[in-house]
């Protein structure tokens, strides 16, 4: 059985009306001419909605929705040490499961079809991802000064996650190896992580050069910047997704470009925590692929990729005084294609043969009138609540504004319960 | 007959439940204890919605919604001269009326209760504002090199608008005098504008120091910066609302503080057009009142005050690397109280005696869970589509997500018609 979308618009085709047929997990056909349904096909008349490739959240910590609105006005290090970590230490696997589902409900409602998540109790994150129907590149965030000081155990946890979840959920789930950062993992831990990643064919997903304090710490400990240090350890021989890259020098940028590191730009989190502004235009000019992530909701405070791409756009243009820095097409590419590259996902550009990770947005709101420029409307005028339908690998996760895979009421009640337990 | 809101939350009172009674155009009572309804009162059980002071859009050009998505990637001067003005010249009064209604539908849906609008065909802007039930400080944007080169006519137009609309719509409409800017109006036009404003007791609403090019032009013509030039002409003896103030020096800031000018900060428009970043923290540190405006939708591309205050927040923190620049309270104050100061509106802080410009937002979405910190939730987690109810001066403009004063379908169909006429 397939799905036949009737009367959809495509971002780069003005107000022209298209038919799209989804068969199995793939786009089967896209046509201006009517496509004939098979007897088994479900026909969905969208009435002129915009069909787009679903968004990829290339760096997040889903369960942190629990901490939304906690300590909104402090810098990164203080925020982690005094506010975030003390609560996180108390979270049970069950807590992490419910918080992940809450986060995924928000993500799917905003048109996100894939996430790169780094957290702990990863089995329960993965369970929620599996049940939700979304794609996930999941990792356990390892923190250990050395292999003998906890590193062995961290690596074993990652190994176990990889053995259990790699390729699970009909291939929707992949696993990454995540040393938390250059300053929270020791050299032998990094070397062992690299070896594990190479051995299992996994990507590395880490935090890199997020704050001035991190750069100073790593420089003091290793004599180099975080990218220089990791390059020296040979880490970038493994495909690497590096979140943030805010405090990077010209030579760091050249290094990242040479190494083929994909950057997960998190503009809202970096701005909120006062970490600074990643040089996105300079990155892109060097050919660095820049994906987009929300980071955890605690430092955002949303998991909204439309808002994120708009923040990237504004933060690239305002301070630089360059009205040509980051077009609608650039911003949308960061939230889609570049994210897919960072996560190692197959392309999904709504061409026949592409996987069917498709999102529909209504264009009939007063705020999207006029909507003749689809890309501009999507990037600069639309809002996450315009998303009405989401398919991942051809499977429907949201239909006409209703989530099909997550019981939101139940999730909110469970999270309410654990909030009362942890916050009082 | 009054309205009794039952079970509402207030931004600074956690999860406590309140009753609010509205009588006529004012808040009559706010109480944790149940308030008894009169037989005439309508009781609205909000089920825990957040009640907030409605937003004030302190600088906009409402009819420009027509140009949403037009030439997204060019600098201010090119954008105005090559793209915006050629279309605007062709707009009829009827066009302006329908476009204003479209804009107001978007504004009200996002919780906006008052706008400072500067445009032309002002009678039709005012008609739409009157019908919509929103508050407006409306002005005709005057452009004239000198009194003899069009200035006389521009002033007469403003005079006529003031005579017709000042205090109209039960006092919801006020009129401002708007020389478009220091570089588009000559000295004698500015002097005449000041005289008119003083004579009629009107405010001045203008564009000030928006771009480097403007500052260079004014400096070349007058020997001073735009604020210095206007101060020399005595303009600031009139209460002045100055949009943008992006390219301002330390001494400009001191001057603006001394003169009591209220700044209408338009962070998204300034970023989009590459004009730069107004130094909001420095302004506020000097005691300058900073309100918030979307500017026209063509340079935004939305009229969403929640998105605008969030952009102000991010743009104040990221580039400055200061996680304490602009708190949730600061950002919300800019979008409410400071806007009211700039427009000369009475306070509306949901205290007994305040005018009832009240907005309700639902807090039951997954994206606003948890919502125990009301101010943080409003500023950083909520979205314009969470707004369900809007009262202006005690009159209901939106109820449970339905606009009561604007026929959206009709407006969209009329705007569709004129779009086809102007864009083809």
Image: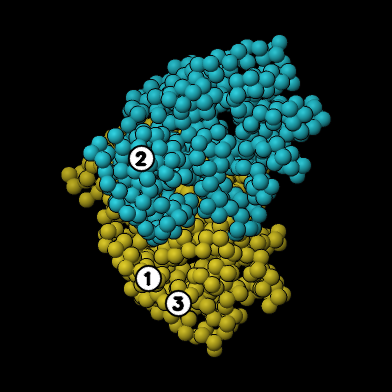
Chain colours: A cyan, B yellow
- Compared to residue A285, the image places residue B408 above or below, namely below
Residue A100 quadrant: top left
Is B56 left, or right, of A250 in this rendering?
left
Residue sitting nearer the eye, B73 or A239: A239
User: Do residues under tags 3 and 2 come within 8 Å of each other at their CB atoms?
Assistant: no
Q: Is residue B42 visible?
A: yes
**Chain letter for mark 2:** A
User: Residue sitting at 52 percent across and 34 percent down?
Assistant: A345
- Residue receiving disc 1: B96
Q: Residues within 10 Å of mark 2 (few under 14, many from 20)?
A: many
| Mark pair 2, 1: CA separation | 43 Å
- Residue A225 x, y percent position in the rendering: 76, 34
Classify mark 2: helix, strand or loop: strand
Is B99 left, or right, of B288 in this rendering?
left
Q: Residues within 10 Å of mark 3 (few under 14, many from 20)?
A: few
- Residue receiving disc 2: A22
Residue B137 quadrant: bottom left
- Compared to residue A211, the image places residue B52 above or below, namely below
User: Residue sitting at 70 percent across and 13 percent down?
Assistant: A147
Q: Residues within 10 Å of mark 1 (few under 14, many from 20)?
A: many
Residue sitting nearer the eye, B312 or A275: A275
Q: Is residue B104 visible?
A: no
Classify mark 3: helix, strand or loop: loop
Is B99 left, or right, of A207 in this rendering?
left
Front of the two marks 3 and 2: 2
Front of the two marks 2 and 1: 2
User: Residue sitting at 43 percent across and 50 percent down?
Assistant: A382
- Residue receiving disc 3: B89
- Residue A98 x, y percent position in the rendering: 42, 23
**Chain letter for mark 1:** B
Are the residues under badges 3 and 2 in a single subunit? no
| Mark pair 1, 3: CA separation | 11 Å
């Amino acid at each position: 059985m397939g799905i036949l979308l009737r009367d959809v618009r495509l971002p780069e085709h003005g107000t022209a009306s298209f038919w799209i047929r989804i068969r199995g997990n793939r786009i089967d056909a896209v046509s201006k001419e009517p496509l004939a349904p098979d007897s088994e096909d479900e026909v969905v008349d969208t009435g002129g909605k915009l069909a787009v490739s679903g968004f990829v959240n290339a760096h997040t910590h889903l369960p942190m929705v629990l901490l939304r609105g906690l300590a909104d006005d402090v810098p990164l290090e203080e925020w982690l040490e005094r506010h975030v970590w003390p609560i996180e230490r108390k979270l049970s696997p069950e807590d992490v499961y419910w918080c992940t589902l809450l986060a995924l409900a928000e993500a799917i409602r905003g048109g996100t079809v894939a996430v790169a998540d780094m957290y702990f109790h990863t089995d329960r994150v993965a369970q929620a991802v599996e049940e939700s129907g979304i794609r996930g590149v999941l990792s356990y965030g390892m923190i250990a000064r050395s292999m003998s000081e906890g590193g062995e155990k961290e690596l074993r946890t990652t190994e176990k996650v990889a053995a259990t979840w790699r390729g699970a959920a009909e291939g929707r789930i992949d696993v990454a190896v995540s040393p938390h950062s250059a300053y929270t993992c020791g050299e032998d831990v990094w070397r062992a992580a690299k070896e594990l990643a190479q051995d299992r064919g996994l990507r590395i997903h880490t935090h890199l050069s997020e704050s001035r304090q991190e750069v100073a710490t790593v420089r003091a400990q290793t004599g180099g910047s975080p990218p220089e240090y990791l390059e020296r350890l040979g880490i970038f021989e493994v495909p690497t997704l590096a979140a943030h890259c805010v405090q990077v020098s010209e030579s760091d940028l050249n290094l990242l470009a040479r190494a083929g590191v994909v950057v997960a730009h998190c503009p809202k989190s970096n701005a909120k925590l006062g970490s600074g502004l990643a040089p996105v235009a300079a990155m892109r000019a060097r050919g660095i692929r820049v994906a987009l992530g929300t980071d955890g909701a605690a430092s955002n405070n949303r998991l909204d990729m439309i808002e994120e791409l708009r923040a990237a756009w504004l933060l690239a243009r305002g301070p630089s005084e360059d009205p040509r820095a980051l077009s609608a097409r650039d911003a949308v590419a960061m939230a889609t294609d570049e994210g897919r590259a960072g996560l190692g996902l197959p392309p999904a550009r709504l061409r026949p043969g592409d996987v069917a990770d498709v999102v529909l947005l209504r264009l009939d709101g007063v705020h999207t009138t006029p909507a003749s420029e689809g890309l501009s409307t999507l990037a600069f005028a639309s809002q996450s609540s315009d998303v009405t339908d989401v398919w991942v690998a051809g499977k429907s996760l949201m239909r006409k504004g209703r989530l099909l895979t997550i019981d939101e009421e139940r999730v909110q009640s469970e999270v309410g319960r654990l909030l009362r337990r942890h916050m009082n």
